[in-house]
Image (spheres, grey):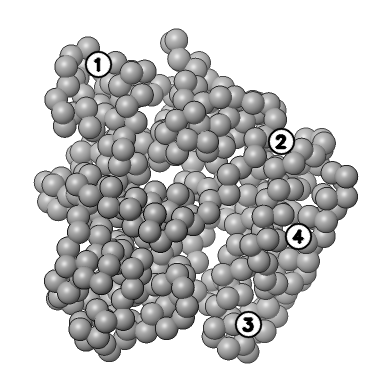
Amino acid sequence: MKKVLWMILIGILNLWYAWAYVTIDESDAAQIEKQINSTVDLTLEQKKEKSKMFYSLARKSYEIRKAFTYATNTVPWVELSWNDWNNIKQRIAILKKLWSAKRWKILVQLRNAQYLAQELWRLYEIESFPTFEGYWVALTATPVFQLPRDNPDINEVIWWPWTQWPKFDGSNLIREVIVVYPKWTVFSLKAKKMKWKNTYYEVRTNEFDAKEDETHSFYIDSRFVDVSKTRPKDIIPKLPSSEQILLNMHNAIGSSYIWWGTYYQGVPELNNYFPSDVKLSANQLKQKTLKWVDCSWLLYQATNGYTPRNSHWLLTYWNAVEIEWNTIDQIVKKLRPLDLIVWAGHVIIVYDAEHVIESRWYPWFKGWVMMTKTKTRLQEIFETRQPVNNWSESKKWKAEKFVVRRRYGIM
């Protein structure tokens, strides 16, 4: 039965390969995800070949999307053949002939196809490593650190030698902390590393695409996870109800803002696993346990990982609200709860008819998650920016514009 299902999956993916603009719905995506999570017996060489095929598909999908929208390149460079480029040009020509609404729907589905192909590429690539250790599931909120390959020591980051606090840089950040993932997240274990009495795993996830170099990679402490030789079932993010998303954000009000902060509740286990020799102040303890969140991660966490984690990706997310040439009062009347007021580098979420919520930076590390009057906040934005309908099509400089994106319906 597994072989039959796998052939169905390959058939769907081959259809994408030939017709890169084919759409898929949520039920299709769920079925494909189910097959990704199934165990298939392949040799290391077969997995390497599958990996090459899927990252080639991801690259072609990206090239088509790039012709129409702001597309972030998380695909490694792949040499494409003449036939591949000719196929890409044909797809672009077809898309240009479609109505904008239809074309946008197809581009969204093409993005989903690209991300799935990227996941399959990584899945096979990691499993083809001779050092592959299996999988793990987060037992609690789990931080991922970028560390030197020859010395992956989280202890030196959380308890910086010869100091009484974690390793902060000039911006008061622990730069080695890449992300904090929620409980039940599934990770692939690329390799095991021992340092003193601690066991660390070199890891990757199907959602986080930070680049690594020859000298650094991404690590977690083994005490945060439960290791399995078989791939656990991924939990596919589902968008919570509007009421629950708003409640989640409201619960974060007052939390500290730190750029790239990812988890406003913090990770208290860090202080337990890496205890300090001296008593830390309340602020030092907050910093050591990563108790902070920035603007896009506030939304990401409130939606249980459903929305993109980066404000740049939110510029073209969901549907555009027509606001170009509108006055402040006109925009206020159009806004609905959970609309996103976004520009490159920041996102503000509409909370209700009169308020917006955001995690906002202020000088001297005094930023926090706050709620303000919508009209007041728009007046401040209008001092330096103007509303546009489409971020990538607008000729205005990125520091001069903002857009509004909406989940339900096209305005």
Q: Residue at x 16, y 67 (%)?
A: 373
Mark 3 / mark 1, whichever is N-terminal:
3
Label 3, label 2: how far apart the Cα atoms are? 37 Å
259 lies above or below 242: above
Depth check, mark 3 against mark 1: the one in front is 1
Q: Nearer the viewer, residue 386 or 319?
A: 319
Q: Which residue does the numbered mark 2 point to in the structure image?
A: 128
Amino acid identity at mark 2: Ser
> Is there CB contact under 8 Å for labels 1 and 2?
no
Q: Dot 2, crowdedness within 10 Å: few (<14), some or many (≥20)?
A: many
Residue 13 marker: 4
**Residue 194 located left or right of residue 321:** right
Q: Dot 3, crowdedness within 10 Å: few (<14), some or many (≥20)?
A: many
Q: Secondary structure at mark 4?
A: helix
Q: Nearer the viewer, residue 12 or 245?
A: 245
Q: Secondary structure at mark 3?
A: helix
